[in-house]
Image (spheres, rainbow, N blue to C red):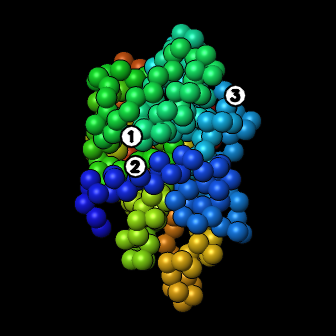
Amino acid sequence: MKEEQELKNIVRERYAKIAEQGKAENAASCCGATTPSNKIYNIMMDDYSETEGYLEDADLGLGCGLPTQFAKIQKGDTVIDLGSGAGNDCFVARHETGLEGKVIGIDFTPIMIEKARANAEKLGYNNVEFREGDIDNMPVNENVADVIVSNCVLNLVPNKKKVIGEIFRVLKPGGHFSISDIVLVGELPKELREDAEMYAGCVAGAIQKSEYLQYIQDQGFENITIQKEKPIQIPEDILSKYLSTEGIQNFNNGGTGIYSVTVYAEKGGAKSAKPKLKLSELQAGSSCCEPSSGCC
């Protein structure tokens, strides 16, 4: 795999191009980075269209979940969106936090920041701000956010452990995050694992689900919960660019799983009064729930 800065440069360059693509093209590919499938329209993203606060112009079709749906945002909260793109999740979060709150979007691709700011100005939102910067070195002071959300972005960052440390630093005591991301169970074929397109496509940069959760626990987060999980199937017409027919069969039958997970966790403090969950209980699936059930 390439060096950390080289990977960041690849992602920044690719996402500058992806920002100019249409939603349909992005949704039918792996995060807009690969050639679109001619068989499946929607590979990773969830449908935002019925979500309050949704702005179609800000939806580039690059997500893999609906983290704002699960984030328990309250009126007056300060919310930070990591990898904010054209601002979609920020505008949904702004609906929840209201005029009393504040939303900060962080993205390291200049054209994404430009698009997001233009969308915010069009909407007349004065409490939504977009800052250019890396999410593993956030341009935000410590103990600022009540809630952090992110949609299919941490997999694109080489040093995920550092990002999780930054999330802990920036959250207020008692704050929490809800993050949708891509994780793995089993090993990807070398051809996918080492391909720059598949890295920018949110696949090659994904880590093992157990490792992802362990990073969160090791940082000191509490009440770690998988709020939603769904398998991701890469269409054969995309896989054929990287694998032979035999390689595709081996991959599909080899037990490797690519999943979108939405993970919730809390930073201990004044707001956190729930008993801690053990990571072993989480991995056994005992804490997985939908937002309407009240167990999150």
Decide which of tag 3 and tag 2 comes sooner along the chain.
Answer: 2
Q: Which residue is mark 2?
A: 12
Residue placed furthest toward the right: 50
Q: Which mark is residue 108?
A: 1
**Residue drawn at (36%, 30%) of the image:** 267
Residue placed furthest toward the bottom: 246
Amino acid under disc 3: Glu
Decide which of tag 1 and tag 2 comes sooner along the chain.
Answer: 2
Please determine whether, in this image, residue 34 is positioned above or below residue 64.
Answer: below
State the separation of the CA atoms marked 3 and 2.
Answer: 30 Å
Of marks 3 and 2, the one in the foreground: 2
- Identify the image quadrant of residue 51: top right
**Residue drawn at (45%, 54%) of the image:** 14
Please determine whether, in this image, residue 203 is positioned above or below residue 154.
Answer: below
- Which corner quadrant holds the N terminus? bottom left
Q: Which mark is residue 52?
A: 3
Q: Nearer the viewer, residue 56 or 74?
A: 56
**Residue drawn at (63%, 64%) of the image:** 36
Residue 206 pos. (x, y %): 42, 59
Q: Which mark is residue 269?
A: none
Q: Nearer the viewer, residue 294 or 63?
A: 63
Q: Nearer the viewer, residue 79 or 221?
A: 79
Secondary structure beneath disc 2? helix
Decide which of tag 3 and tag 1 comes sooner along the chain.
Answer: 3
Amino acid under disc 1: Phe
Residue placed furthest toward the top: 100
